[in-house]
Amino acid sequence: MEEDEFIGEKTFQRYCAEFIKHSQQIGDSWEWRPSKDCSDGYMCKIHFQIKNGSVMSHLGASTHGQTCLPMEEAFELPLDDCEVIETAAASEVIKYEYHVLYSCSHQVPVLYFRASFLDGRPLTLKDIWEGVHECYKMRLLQGPWDTITQQEHPILGQPFFVLHPCKTNEFMTPVLKNSQKINKNVNYITSWLSIVGPVVGLNLPLSYAKATSQDERNVH
Amino acid sequence: MAEEPQSVLQLPPSSAAGGEGLTDVSPETTTPEPPSSAAVSPGTEEPAGDTKKKIDILLKAVGDTPIMKTKKWAVERTRTIQGLIDFIKKFLKLVASEQLFIYVNQSFAPSPDQEVGTLYECFGSDGKLVLHYCKSQAWG
C-alpha cells in the first residue's frame, strides 16, 4: 500500500501562490483572498456561463446568422431583435464561484463552489447534479451525498456546495509518487484541480500543465 | 523513426462509442485482447506525419492500475479524453464505480472534452503523445 501524500497548510499556500502566478500570466482570474485575520485564506475564481453550455458571447451581437455590423451602425438593427437577444441571454447566464480552501482535518485542499443566476437566484443541488459532466454522472448518481454536499464555508460562513475530500489522497498519491520517481516538481494544487474541477464545470487551460515544467531545465 | 508493420485492429460498431477510431499499432502484440471479438487484419502503412488524421498515443499505467497489453494506439485527433477513458475502462474491464484518470506530463488531467489532437500538439514528442492513466475510487 502506498503511503498517503498529505500537504501542510504552508505548502498549500505556496502551491496556491504559484498557481495564481500562472493564472495572472494567462488572464485566468484566480485570486487569493485572505481571511479577516490573514492567518489563512483561499483561492477564488468567478466565471459566467450561459446555461445551454455555449460560450459566453457579447450581449447584443448577432447570433442568428445576420451580418455583423460595425458598432457605429448598430442603431440600424431593429431594436426588438437586440432586446430579445439580451433578455434571453440575461436569464440564462449563470455565475459560478469556485473556492479552493485547505482542510486541516483532511490535510488536503477542498473545492467549494456555488452558482446563481444573475438575478441572485441560487442553483439548487439538483441543478448542480444535472450540470455534472457525463464522465462522472454515473458515479455521482450512485452516491450523490458522498460526492457533492452542501456545507457552510469555513471562512465566509455562507452555504456552499463542496466536493467531498475524503478520497483525495486516493487519486493524488499515485500521481505524486510517480512524479517523485522521476524527480519532477509537481504543483499539487494544479494536479488536484485539474482532476476535480471538470466534475463541477471548472476546466483548467492546458498551459497550467506546462507552467511547472517550464521551471525545470531538463527535458525528457 | 523506422517504419514498422502495423496490425490494424478493427473495433466492431457495437462496442462503445469511445472505441471508434482507435487502432492498434503495436507490433509486439499479435493476439490483442479487445473488449469483444474483432477481426484483426494487416493494414496498409500510413506515413507518420503531422498531416495524418490519427496520432500515436502511448499509454502508461500509474500506481496499481493494470497495465494494458497493448500500449500503443493510433487515435483520431478529434477523439476526446472522455472517449479514451471509456475505451480504456472497457479494455481493462473496470467496474462502473471505478474512476479512470488520464494525465499529460504525468501530473495534469486534461478536461474530458479535450481533444487528443490538441494534446499532441502541446505535449507530443518523438511523434507520439505519452499519456499516463490511473484508476481510482475517487469519491464515496
Image (spheres, coloured by chain):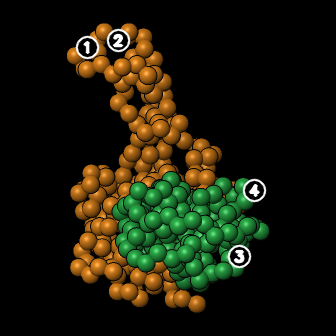
The chain holding disc 4 is: B
Q: CA distance from mark 2 to mark 1?
A: 8 Å
Q: CA distance from mark 3 to mark 4?
A: 16 Å
Q: Nearer the viewer, mark 2 or mark 3?
A: 3
Q: Nearer the viewer, mark 2 or mark 4?
A: 4
Q: Nearer the viewer, residue B82 or A219?
A: A219
Residue A193 in sight from this viewpoint = no
Q: Nearer the viewer, residue B27 or A61?
A: B27
Residue identifier under label 4: B14
Task: Say which residue appears at 66% left-offset and 55% top-offset.
Answer: B17
Under mark 2, the amino acid is Leu
The chain holding disc 1 is: A
The chain holding disc 2 is: A
Up-down relation of residue B139 to residue A2 (above or below): above
**Residue reaching furthest to the right:** B37
Pointer 3 with pointer 4, Cβ within 8 A: no
Residue identifier under label 3: B33
State left or right for residue A82 relative to residue B69. Answer: left
Under mark 1, the amino acid is Glu
Q: Picture coordinates of residue A189 (x, y %)?
A: 39, 69
Q: Picture coordinates of residue B81 (x, y %)?
A: 53, 60
Q: Picture coordinates of residue A158 (x, y %)?
A: 46, 51
Task: Say which residue appears at 54% left-offset and 88% top-offset.
Answer: A2
Q: Colour of chain A?
A: orange
Q: Secondary structure at mark 1?
A: helix
Task: Say which residue appears at 42% left-offset and 49% top-offset.
Answer: A97
To which quarter of the image does residue A166 belong? bottom right
Residue identifier under label 2: A77
Same chain letter for marks 2 and 4: no
Q: Colour of chain B?
A: green
The tag on residue A73 is 1
Q: Secondary structure at mark 3?
A: loop
